[in-house]
Image: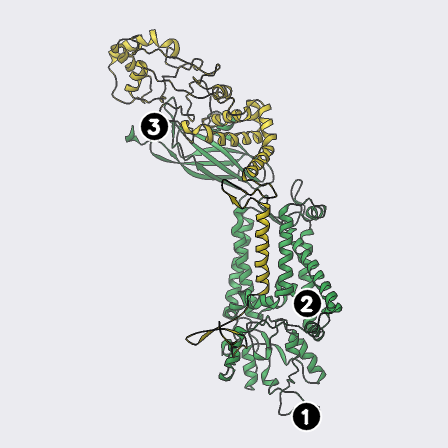
Amino acid sequence: MPTKIEKDALTGKETTGHDWDGIRELNTPVPRWWLYVWLATIAWGIALFILYPAIPLGRTATAGLLGYTSHGALDKSLRALQAERAPFFDKIEATSLEDIQKDPDLLSVALIAGKSAFANNCSPCHGPSGSGRPGFPNLEDDVWLWGGTLDQIKQTITYGVRSGNPDAHVSDMPHFGADNLLPPDDIQAVADYVSTLYGGQQKGTAPAPASVEAGAKIFGDNCAPCHGDKGQGNPDVGAPRLASATHLYGNDRATIVHQVTLPRQGVMPAWTGRLDDATIKSLALYVHSLGGGQ
Amino acid sequence: MSIVQKIEPAEPADAPEQDLRLVKDRVRVYPMSVKGMVRSFKWEVLAFCLLVYYLLPWLRWDRGPGRPDQAVLVDIWNERMYILGFEFWPQDIYLLAGALILAAFALFMVTSLLGRVWCGYTCPQTVWTDLFLGVERLIEGDRNERIKRDTGPLSWDKIWRKTAKHSIWLFVAFWTGGAWIMYYVDAPTVTCEFWTGTASFQVYFFTGLFTATTYLLAGWAREQVCTYMCPWPRFQAAMLDEQTLTVTYQGWRGEPRGKKHPDETWSGRGDCVDCNACVHVCPTGIDIRDGQQLECIGCGLCIDACNHVMTKLERPNWLITWDNLVRQNAKIKHETVPEIRFLRPRTLIYAAVLVAGAGGMAYAVTNRSELNLIVQRDRAPLFVRLADGTLRNGYTLSIANKKPMARTFQLSLKGMDGAELALPESSGGQASAVDVAAKADTVTDVRVLVRAPSSVHGNVPVSFVLRDTLSGATQEWTSTFLAPSATAE
């Protein structure tokens, strides 16, 4: 501290008494308004300590007079959001899928809700855009195992496939190879025949005509009851369409052999009970809109 | 001769005083009231500007049912701006940039011709400061009375006058902030909502904010805004030249100045009697006799003050006047005084830019399309193979229909043989052309699926053509159809 107050010759103001190579610093007080703002922030801070959770007490903290919790705030904002959406969801729930599709405003709400629900619930298996992957159906194409109308899609989402729900879709293809229902040579012949149904999209070399002919007969005896005599499939029993350019597990011949020998059968959960009816309907509309459904 | 030379009066002896300016506290300015033609003109401009500002939101303009009928409205909630018969969308924001550029060049041109008339007469800071000063003068009296009261002790008189002044300031500031809001929401509606407590938080917040800024800037900060906060005074000198009219003290006539004894004759001395009237009326507190300077807003109130004194002294008026450097130099040297040249390269270039810019703007405003199409390809999947081997790509169309009625468009494809369209959201079937409905005065998003034969390979450009079924107006957007390459199969 300087022992005597020094004054700056030029301005007549007090200096701090410090001298750096002839440069002296004016002892200008902080502006009054700044001081008041500073005091106000201190008062504000004390008020926050009293009103809100503030002082840590080991595992907990002082509760504050306002009873604020961040969980409570989240609950409140979620409830407000739900209340805001309720009129739309009530209307979606009360309206049939076909009628929603004819109401552009309601449809746009349902599609947005469906898109959001799809990203949260469906995209882990079906992919973010619904394009699937081997074993998980592509929802953008026109191949539908269990039918692609709005109601069929809603049915599948609601009860699932082999989900354990009593109303779930269940299909059980015989294990033609594993259970020795067909000898290996017949399975090879069937594979040759089925690959000709792929419309030029099969992978691998073209099969021998004799084997195809033999396969066609075996197919007629064993496979046609479910898959149809031309391999057109049957959504009622979940029998995939074989006369197609695109397939659930892949287009190469080895996949056909595998599926006939020991069929892989996917599982989809039932969403009833997890999602409300309006959300399931929105999902059905959204999934239907991806590729136009059937 | 340039303006820079004129404002260099500093001599070595004055150096400490010059330095002091950097460290001294604010010297409060107490502008004295003045009467005269400049003052009258300034009051008229002030009244005009305030009337326009307060009343413009109340001007109505019929745009048909269901649409705002406010002549000037920046409807932020609905992303629309209305100016009389024009409606602007966010896409038209470049027009705002154009308007601002035009305004800047208009300012440059006016400044280059007449000096800082914008600052002195029409700048909102000047208009409201003038208004607030008028209120102050009405309640606290003129300059001397105000200085005396401010330096004197606290008294009942001081308290009530200050309270009254600040109350009226806040009242004016509140109406200013409130009027600002009316440019963004319907004026009658928001006025009603405001006083019934049903207006939105934003309305109350921004009214409060602009009340506070008006009160602080016009009541407290005043000339400091012009001197320290505003960038314009710092570079406006670049627009001035020796032909620019500025508020000028005619030193050749006024000097040598000095108090005049009643017996003294006018010979051998200047007309300036050093009465300081010009300094006392100055709203920025400067001495115009020091020449053109940064703080001078060019309002010319000193001209009125000096003319008043000159009349009393029976000397010719206009010791302080509007003049340019060329003429002043000629007068100093007793040469022929040239005419003011308003047409010179600088002003002609500004005028040319203004005309070209205004023409471009007029063209852009009148030729805006009322239909806009943007097509976005789905990012994933790149393509979908259908059961029959054909390929499909998904697209989202954004159709901006700027007309106030719903329109139906026919959507077709160009550039790809055998391609078909489908609208999956409404379960429309495949067709070479589909009908798309676009809602009135908004952007409608429509998802479209395009199916192409399996013979298509690689990246194929494909154009979406949108045709108004009534007017025949078309819009086109070229996107890409993706298919597996021929070698990948």
* Mark closer to the chain start, 2 or 3: 2
Which of the two marks, 2 or 3, is nearer to us in this view?
2
Measure the C-alpha gap from mark 2 to mark 3.
82 Å
Q: Residue B278, relative to residue B407: is it above or below?
A: below
Amino acid type at circle 1 is: Glu
Coordinates of residue B476 in the picture (x, y in percent): 46, 39
Instruction: Please tell me whether mark 3 sits on a helix, a strand or a loop.
Output: loop
Q: Nearer the viewer, residue A87 or B78?
A: A87
Amino acid type at circle 3 is: Ser
Q: Chain letter of disc 1? A: B
Instruction: Please tell me whether mark 1 sits on a helix, a strand or a loop.
Output: loop
Amino acid type at circle 2 is: Leu
* Mark closer to the chain start, 2 or 1: 2
Measure the C-alpha gap from mark 2 to mark 1.
38 Å
Coordinates of residue B347 in the picture (x, y in percent): 53, 68
Q: Which mark is residue B264?
A: 1
Identity of the residue drawn at 32% across and 10% down: A219
Chain in green in the render: B
Residue wearing tag 3: B455
Residue wearing tag 2: B133
Coordinates of residue A164 in the picture (x, y in percent): 45, 16
